[in-house]
Image (cartoon, helix red, strand yellow):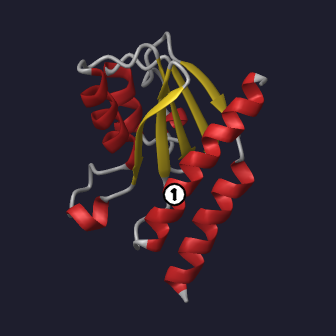
């Protein structure tokens, strides 16, 4: 399977997490962490449920992955997330020495790419993977909130 195909398969797993978040009344962002071809963590936003502004999908997934691995570094891991990470989450990825970040839709207002140097210099980035599906979940969620 080509890397692009693999990225899409794994992003679909993150989209399932995002769907679960939306159904629970959370902003629909989902995430999976993969190490050596295996999903080792799954998460979605829990900010409402936990009443915690730091409970983003990525933060939950980084914590779960580190727990699974028994160490704080994710230097052999890829994190798949449906929406471009915010600066807080990108900084956490920096400290975790994340090997690779793959995200779906960009976030021109709150995404990390508005700032320089938030990701570890060794972190590889792929963006736009199933971006339309990820953006569609976000648009539908906020449309429903407005109605």
Q: Residue at x 60, y 24 (%)?
A: 125
Is residue 105 at all visible to an observer of this figure?
no
Q: Residue at x 73, y 23 (%)?
A: 3
Is residue 103 at all visible to an observer of this figure?
yes
Which image quarter: residue 67?
top left
User: Furthest-bottom residue in view?
Assistant: 147
Residue at disc 1, secondary structure: helix
Q: Residue at x 47, y 64 (%)?
A: 20
Residue 60, above or below 6: below
Number of disc labels: 1
At which x and y percent is residue 111? 51, 43
At which x and y percent is residue 27? 45, 64
Front in this rendered view, residue 70 or 22: 70
From the viewer's perspective, is 5 left or right of 28? Answer: right
From the viewer's perspective, is 87 left or right of 12? Answer: left
Residue 120, above or below 118: above
Which image quarter: residue 147?
bottom right
The residue pinned by badge 1 equals 18
Badge 1, how many Cα within 10 Å: few under 14, some, many 20+? many
At which x and y percent is residue 62? 34, 33
Q: Residue at x 78, y 23 (%)?
A: 2
Front in this rendered view, residue 53 or 23: 23
From the viewer's perspective, is 135 left or right of 62? Answer: right
From the viewer's perspective, is 34 left or right of 90? Answer: right
Residue 84, above or below 29: above
Q: Locate the N terminus and report the quarter of the image it occupies.
A: top right
At which x and y percent is residue 126? 65, 28
Front in this rendered view, residue 110 or 76: 76
């Amino acid at each position: 399977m080509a890397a692009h195909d693999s990225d899409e398969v794994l992003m679909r797993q993150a989209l399932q997490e995002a769907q679960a978040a939306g159904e629970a009344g959370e902003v629909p962002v989902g995430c999976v962490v993969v190490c050596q071809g295996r999903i080792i963590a799954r998460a979605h936003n829990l900010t409402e449920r936990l009443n915690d502004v730091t409970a983003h999908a990525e933060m939950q997934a980084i914590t779960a992955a580190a727990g699974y691995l028994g160490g704080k570094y994710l230097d052999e891991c890829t994190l798949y997330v449906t929406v471009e990470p915010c600066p807080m989450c990108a900084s956490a990825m920096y400290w975790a020495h994340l090997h690779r970040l793959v995200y779906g839709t960009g976030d021109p207002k709150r995404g990390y790419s508005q700032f320089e140097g938030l990701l570890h210099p060794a972190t590889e980035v792929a963006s736009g993977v199933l971006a339309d599906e990820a953006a569609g979940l976000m648009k539908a969620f906020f449309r429903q909130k407005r109605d």
